[in-house]
Structures are given as C-alpha cells and as structure tokens.
Image (cartoon, rainbow, N blue to C red):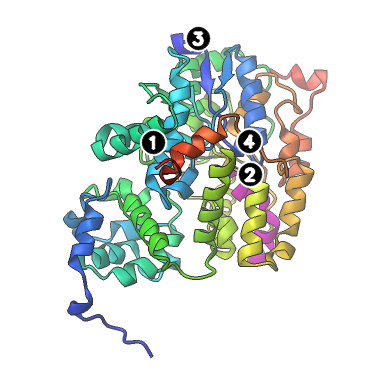
Amino acid sequence: MSNESEKGYLYFPGCSLKSTGRAYEESLLELFRLLDIPLQELDDWNCCGATSYMGIDEEAAFVLGARNLSIACQTPGRDLMAPCSACYMVLRKTQDYTSKYPQVRREVEAAMKRADLPMPGQVKIRHPLEILYHDVGAERLKNLKKRNWLGGTIACYYGCQAVRPYSDVDDAYNPVKMDELLRAMGVQTIDYCLKTKCCAGVLTGTVPPVGRRVNYILLKEAVRKGAQAVVTICPLCQINLDAYQKEISAESGERFDIPILYLPQVLGWMLGGRKKELAFHRCIAGRRYLNEWLRETKEEEAYV
Amino acid sequence: MERQIRYQREARPAWGAEIAKLPGCERLYSCIQCGTCSGTCPMSLYMDYTPRRVIALIREGFYKDALSCRTIWLCASCYSCSSRCPQDIKVTDIMYALKREAIKRKVYPSRFPTPVLAREFYRLVKMFGRNSEFLLVFLLTLKTNPLGFLTMARTGIALLLTGRLSPKVEMIRDAARLRKALEPKEVA
C-alpha cells in the first residue's frame, strides 16, 4: 500500500454521481471503506462543465475547473480523485491549458479575481482505476478477497475521456489495468476490442438514433465475445449501455439483457461488501442475472 | 436550388487564421488531409462533412459551411481524432472552437437538440453551480421535441424506480460568487 492511500484522497463526485450514476458513488465509497482508505468529499464543489461548457464559453469552462481545483488546494497534501471520466478530463485539461496557454491563464486569473477566489496551486488529479491499480495494488486486493465472482466472463469497457487525451490512467487505445485487476481476482475477462470506443456521450439523449446505434454495436460485440456483464468506470458509459437495452433490442431484433456494472461494485462484492451498499439494485438491465449471481448466504460466502 | 460548389471569392482565409490562433487550434495548418480523424471517428458516418473535410473548409476560409454543418454537433468529444492525428492536431478543440463560433453567430441548425442541450446545461450550471439531470432533460425535450416525453417514458420510469433520477436541484453555497466569476459583464 502506498503513502497516498494511507493519507486518503480528496474526492470530487461530480453531478452524475449524485443522480443517474449514484451506484458509482455508493459502491466506490463502500469499496474504499472496505479497503480502509479515507475519502473526503470536496467542500462545496461545482459542476465540472462537462463537454457542453467547452463548446459555449471556453473561459467559463476553465473557470469552473479552476474553482474546484482551488478548493482542493485548500487541503494540501492529498490527491484529488475524480471518478467520472468527464470530470477527470475537464479538471486535467484546466490544469494543462492554464499552464500551457498564457492567454487562458490570464482570463482565468481575471475571472477568479472578480469573484475573489484564489488561483489554484498544483494538485494531483487521479482516477479511481489508477488509484486501485497503483496505490492499492492487485496484491492487496487479492489478500482481502472474501468471495469468488459468480457472474461469469466480463467485458472491461474503459470509454474515452478517462484514457484520452491524457493517458496517465492507462493507454489511450489498449488500456489493460481493469482487466489485470479483475484477472488477478480470478475473474475472466474478454478481449474487448471496442473498449475505448465512445459510448456517444450525451448524443444518446440528444440524437437517440445515433446514440442507440453506437451502443448497440458496443453491446453486440461484448455479447459476441462471450461477456456476461460489462464493467465500466464512467457514469455516462454506464447509463448509455444500461438504460436503453429494451429500445436497442426492439430496434435491432436481437435481445439484450446484460448487466452493466461499475468496477467498484464487482471489486467491492469480492471483498465481501453487501449487495445493497454496493447499489446493485440501481441496475436496470440484467437484474435477474444479478439476483442469481449475488447471494449473501453464509454457505455462499464460504466459497473462497 | 442551391449551388453545390463554392467559389474561391466566397472564402475568407483570414477567418481560418483567426481560428488557428485559439488555444488548442494552433496546428490547424499542418494538416496533411490523411483522414485518420474521419476513420477513427465513431460518429463520422452520420456527419454531413467528415472531420477531415471540416479542417479543409476552415483552412480555406469557407466559414459558412464549417459553421452550419451538423458535424460539429455530432462530435461527442471522445478525443479519438486528437490522439490518433499523426500531425498532433487537436481536432476536438477545433470542433469546440467551431461550436462556440456557431453559437455566437447563431448559425447552428435549428431544432437540432445538441446545441440546445449545451445552452440549457450552461444556464443551469451558471444558476445553481451544479447540473440537474432531471431539469436538463425536461427543458431539452420541451424545447426540441415535446413528443419525446412519450418515447422517453420507459427509460425515465426505469431511472425513477432505481432512484437514479431526482427532481431535486442541488445548489452550491457559493453560487453567487461563482456566477460573478462566470459573468464578466455583471461586474464591469
């Protein structure tokens, strides 16, 4: 276990983790509780601006990021964890562009001054996948393992903004850290060639035919390769793959009913977490499989 | 009938040069038109101009075509093009720059939901400091496709039943100061 994980992390939930992606927050908090790593939610954080702000007002987009970073800097010495891929990317971009482009820095400085907010110093922005991989490590997870995974083969879906354009979390096109963690825990994963293809993001809501087609392709490939569940690390990927499976089935004539889970849900379950605390009840698709896989009885727990 | 080819005199190369000055757009003129961006783009098959063609349009200064095309509103910001470009062009940033120009000049395709969503999202976050997914979807559907409430009902109900959609709007404590930072005109 590294120093960072003993100190704990500051935690930036973002808007999705408080609503449509609630299961991500709940399972992440439970997993970190099981790992005994303290998390502190960033005080009075604001929306990261996601992809929409960049497309309307770039200065405002960076100001949103700068305010969050400046709050994080008030608690020095701890890394800032951003579980949502969009939040992670926007915070990283704010840091990158304010240091790389003097004109961006000047604009952000002026805006922060107007509102009497301090300019942020340096804070390290981290994604939970990379924290679990580097700071916690597969070895420690393996030692804490209490249950086997009965849910069969998994497709690890990394999505786009966690690995691009900043590739510190994992490789931009062939990330493997999620697969490695799960394999170390004894879970089979497929070679999912679409693992970094976009889930269509907000387009699933704004241009449904396009969004659903993209998600149909993602689901079909996972099923074709033999996956029984897809595991994600982003709230937008999760909702896009999870919430429209009935519509996608109707349009394609193929039947999709496959659970879309968050990485902390699967890891948390194997570390002995409870079904409710890990928020499995918030899944929409594949519920009957989840009921079959996740049994909390004593005999089942003695499996390992 | 609209003429399908463009004359050179309609182009404004100076406009392209302005775009190239924006943060992230600086390598615009190094494009070799290889089409890697279009090939890797998951949305290009729905676009009227592929990303490669949009770059070419900006460079030549055909601003009307570059700004009014649907391409920029189909970009999901997955950064595939930016990561794969052999010339290190940040195509995603160029798309963002065009979105901003199009909104400023009000030339985006009417009733196309993506820019409407972006603007409603912008307003909500400015007002509350956080986004409300419930309100956002409601406003978007109301403004672009009221019949959409019917087709979206199943997903909406499923999300409500799993506790993933709440009509509650969260507001940050420091919303007033954040608004000040976002709105230069109010103080000036």
Decide: marks 4, 1 in contact (CB < 8 A)?
no
Residue A2, visible in the rendered structure: no
Residue B65: image quadrant is: bottom left
Residue holding disc 1: A111
Q: The residue under label 3 is which amino acid type?
A: Lys
Q: Position of residue A72 (x, y in %)?
A: 47, 21
Left-right relation of B30 to A187: left
Q: Which residues are magenta?
A: A237-251
Q: CA distance from mark 3 to mark 2?
A: 32 Å
Q: The residue under label 1 is which amino acid type?
A: Ala
In this view, A249 is above or below A137: below
Q: The residue under label 4 is which amino acid type?
A: Met
N-term mark: 3 or 1: 3
Q: CA distance from mark 3 to mark 1?
A: 33 Å
Decide: marks 2, 4 in contact (CB < 8 A)?
no
Q: Farthest residue to the front: give it.
A: B188
Secondary structure beneath label 1 = helix
In this view of the protein, which residue sits in the foreground, B183 or B157?
Answer: B183
What is the chief secondary structure element of the magenta stretch? helix
Residue holding disc 4: B171
Residue shown at the point (47%, 38%) measured from the top left? B180
Residue B186, visible in the rendered structure: yes
Q: The residue under label 2 is which amino acid type?
A: Ser
In this view of the protein, which residue sits in the foreground, A271 or B101?
Answer: B101
Q: Nearer the viewer, mark 2 or mark 1?
A: 1
| Classed neighbour count for the residue bearing mark 3: other residues with Cα under 10 Å, few (<14), some (14–19), many (≥20) | some
Left-right relation of A52 to B19: right
Residue holding disc 3: A7
Residue holding disc 2: B132
